Image: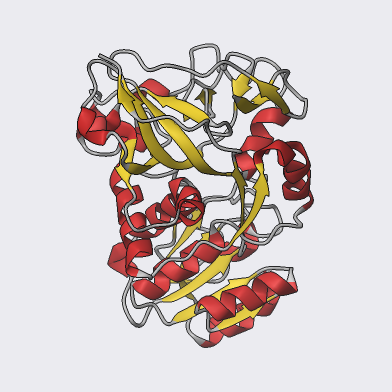
Amino acid sequence: MLAVQLTAWGAEPEVRDVPMPRPRGEQVLVRVAAAGLCRSDLHVMDSPAGVFDYPLPLTLGHEVAGTVAEVGPDADPGWLGEPVVVHGVWSCGDCRNCRRERENYCLATRRRPDGRLAPLGNGLGHHGGLAEAMLVPSTRFLVRAHGVDPVAAAPLADAGATAYHAIREHLDLIDADTVVLVIGIGGLGHLAVQVLRDLGVRAIVAVDERAEARDLAVRLGARIALPDIESAAAELAAAGGADLVLDFAGAPATVAPAARTLAPGGRLVQVGSAGGRVEVGKDLGLAAGWRVAAPFWATRADLAAVLDAARRGALHSTTATFPLAEAPAVYRALRAGTITGRAVLIPPGLSPSSTRNRR
């Protein structure tokens, strides 16, 4: 089967022919229907050796939608034929954070003693879904996706669930009067605008330097979309400041300036990781009671929630689709910032065969 694999650190991925995997034990085989691309993939492939404790070659792809085609002898055969999205955090299920249903902060995924980042899930340490099929270690990492098109569902595994999680952690601030600044209307930001609208937020100020992204933000429900934070600052000041800032860029030009737009008690949530920094202190001239958070990905329950929102018609992924074989060129376009919404790759499909339970 075809798979998009990273074969060397600091290099572009390659489209390769690899053996079809077969499930053992509790594993399940998912026939991939669609797989989203993410800028975190670029971070992985650009890193030098020694940053990640990931074996190479590694099949990329952590936003995956498909159908359960085969199950191992110890897996539930009731999943056969089910449309699913894969939850990309393959947590231990036993640590204190997993027991708290905070599996995106599983203790087994913390850094190695030597500083290397541990394998996290599909495409991030374990073979992912930029392929015709992929193995998932357990049905614990599957969410049923009935009624949601795979192309729309795949980006919800990360972009949708991460945006939702970043907002859900601050639901105590969310009501009809909330003022929110959303920075970066890309793969995550355009979904965050929709999540906020679904929660009843009306005063959404969007910032993006790209005109087409600003137009998209307004179409999706933002009250106004502006090219930079300086332009947004006056709009927010008239409203008393932002109760919540969601920074999906996380760049030096966004993080620190965004903190100065906060209302008293407001919160800065840095989701993007483009090198931005903010100084923390109580004597910086910022609003009283301000907070900063840096959430990571999402729980399985968050993924189920965004799939439900998509099923209800409250959440729509803006996507651009490409054949799986074009992955290297699409990654270059993603790096250049020329893709609006989420890039989704479509595999050529498996040879016709019936689903089966390997027992």
State whether residue 104 is above or below residue 47.
below
Instruction: Report the residue at 39% width, 45% height from top.
Output: 298
Instruction: Report the residue at 69% width, 29% height from top.
Output: 45
Count of marks overlaid on the render: 0
Confirm whether residue 209 shows in the render. yes
Q: Which quarter shows the C terminus?
A: top left
Looking at this view, is 285 or 205 the one in front? 205
Looking at this view, is 122 or 257 the one in front? 122
State whether residue 325 is above or below residue 7.
below
Confirm whether residue 285 shows in the render. no
Q: Is residue 103 left or right of residue 250?
A: left
State whether residue 266 is above or below residue 118.
below
User: Percent x, y for residue 305?
Assistant: 31, 55
Q: Is residue 136 left or right of residue 117?
A: left
Looking at this view, is 142 or 131 the one in front? 131
Q: Residue furthest bottom?
A: 238
Instruction: Report the residue at 71% width, 36% height from top.
Output: 325
Instruction: Report the residue at 41% width, 70% height from top.
Output: 196
State whether residue 85 is above or below residue 227.
above
User: Percent x, y for residue 97?
Assistant: 27, 32
Q: Which quarter shows the N terminus?
A: top right
User: Percent x, y for residue 66?
Assistant: 43, 41
Looking at this view, is 78 or 234 the one in front? 78
Q: How is the image coloured?
A: secondary structure
User: Percent x, y for residue 44?
Assistant: 64, 30
